Amino acid sequence: MRPQTAALSSTTAHQAGAVIPLAFLLVIRLALGLLYSVIVPTWESYDEDGHFAYARYLAKYHTLLQPGDPEAEKIWEKFQPPLYYLFIAPLIAGFDLGETFETPERNPYRLNQNAGFNYAIHPDRFEGTARSISLAVQIARAASVLLSTASVGAVYLAARRVWPTEPKTAWAAACVYAFWPQFLFTGSMVTNDALVIALAAVLFYFAVRLALDGFHLGCALAIGVILGAALLTKLNAIALIPVVVIALLMSLGLSRSWRSPRLWLALAALGLIVMLGLWVLNSLEFITAQILQTQTVSDFLNYANPGGAARPRFLLLALQHGLRTFLGAFGWGSPELPGWLYWVWGIGANLAVVGLSIVIVERDRSASFKILTLAICQIISLVGLALALAMAERSAYLVWGRYLLPCLPGVAVSLITGWRALLPRRWRTHVWKGLCLGVVLIGWSIPLVTLAPAYAKPPRLPKDAVIDYPLSVFFGEEIELLGYLQPQAVTPGKDFRIVLCWQAIAPLNRNYSVLLEIIGPDGQAYGWLETYPGRGNYPTSFWAVNAPFCDPYTLGVEKDWPAASAAYVQVSLLSNFGGEKLPVRNVAGELVGQEVRIPVQVRVVAQK
């Protein structure tokens, strides 16, 4: 048997033996994705209401968005290509989707510091059409989970082609991809990011095959169809075109049949597919009106030229924001991961860069080096496109990590390649096992440690609970401030936390706001917070009568504090967002003002 044939047979045998472990990995990934989709409340993913409204329109009217239709015009995501929504629409068509799409009631304090993360107001139970839509959202999310989970198989198969004699290394790359925190979250929501990421993974697999095996007609046509589908899913798929081109060039370098009619037929077909995809995009009025404009290119060139405003500081800020949110920034940009994970990510990425430098300097001509070129191209293309758009729009914070997720297959392969170069061979198996276990544990901890608490409502106070400082004062005719727990001392320049205990004494049908102010000895406010209770998750219209609870609040305190140490927290209830203060009465029913004052100690730090 020829050595090449023997190696191929060995690789095939390894792949056959990996079917059960791969299926097990996919089941774990599927279960975890479904957990994310269930724990995160409806609409708590960036523009999820807009993505769902798009799919709902297609399901209800059986047509693409029609310019001039008032209902279509109101859909914020109308400028997106339609493929993902065409995939989702049949899955939700059987639900009661309502006569019109009702925009969810929003939390007006979402962007206020320490006021919570939730974008929408979520009742404990939905009824009627709202319940049907909630179920439809869960079905659409489950479809996204299936797409993102299936893409793990493509990355694993690509990694096996890169390291045919190192199955543990391939598993490491697959695990890094599968359990990447931002991918876990985004791939479990209603968003076209889920489909374009999955297509990018499959495209990467076929690009690897072309680069390693040489030109093959079926493979070339497959990569063309996938690229066309990606272009019809999200516009950032344009950044995948260079990956396809480089893979084809690599395959032609290995091919001995330059004059083969099948070769030129495949190239012509690929070009036709890309041109057809771009033509379809250009024919969609919403896309051409908002995105595909020459003015966007002009804005970028004006900002990027040497005499323009683009500076290294802008690019550094954009990259920093992009890389941080690429690892994990959930909801509408918050909550985020625990801080230590960003440090681990930074250290790991820098170590990988060192290892990649070694691979490049040594001019390794192995399969991994060739695929590394594809991986780096995928990363640079996505990051470059995001930076170009940020420069055109003059906003460094436009580089969100979810826009970069189509390059995640390249990131996973690059990280493993870099770490592999630094590891002695005898250590690799143990390190890869530890790495896989670590990313799986982190992936499973995020829903329980980060996401669930971010959207949790305060628990009901037990009957035998003791409140440290009872007050029993009343705001208006409906709300009682029972008291507060022992507050910490106020430290200038640091956050201050206080826990207030409330209950409704009459049915509530409106949402009052809590206003807290830290008042110094000079009568000036040195910290304040206006929010809905429960960090936005438990507005007063949800309160049950005679169901007491305690609610923590965190206020930022200014550094510039007077020398004297007397202070108090002033508590008020507002009629609505930024509204008038409600009157306060004591147990006897006497009016005592519009605020309740809670004395606190101040820990003044000596200035050096």
Image: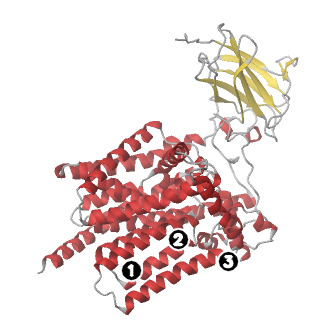
In the image: residue 486, left or right of residue 160: right
C-alpha span from label 2 to label 3: 17 Å
Neighbor class of circle 3 (other Cα within 10 Å; few <14, some 14-19, many 20+) is few
- Residue matched to label 1: 219
Mark 1 residue element: helix
Q: Where is residue 558 in the image (x, y as percent from the top left)?
A: 64, 22
Of the two numbered discs 2 and 3 in the rendering, the one whose residue sits closer to the viewer: 3
Quarter of image, res 559? top right
Q: Position of residue 581 (x, y in %)?
A: 84, 28
> Residue 186: in sight, yes or no?
no
Q: What residue type is labelled 2?
A: Ala
Q: In which quarter of the image is the N terminus?
A: bottom left
C-alpha span from label 1 to label 3: 29 Å
Q: What residue type is labelled 3?
A: Ser
Quarter of image, res 466? top right
> Sequence-wise, which precedes: disc 2 or disc 3?
2
Q: Which residue is drawn at 42% across and 54% down?
A: 179
Q: Where is residue 568 in the image (x, y as percent from the top left)?
A: 70, 15
Task: Please tell me the numbered disc located at residue 283.
Answer: 3
Task: Please tell me the numbered disc located at residue 230.
Answer: 2
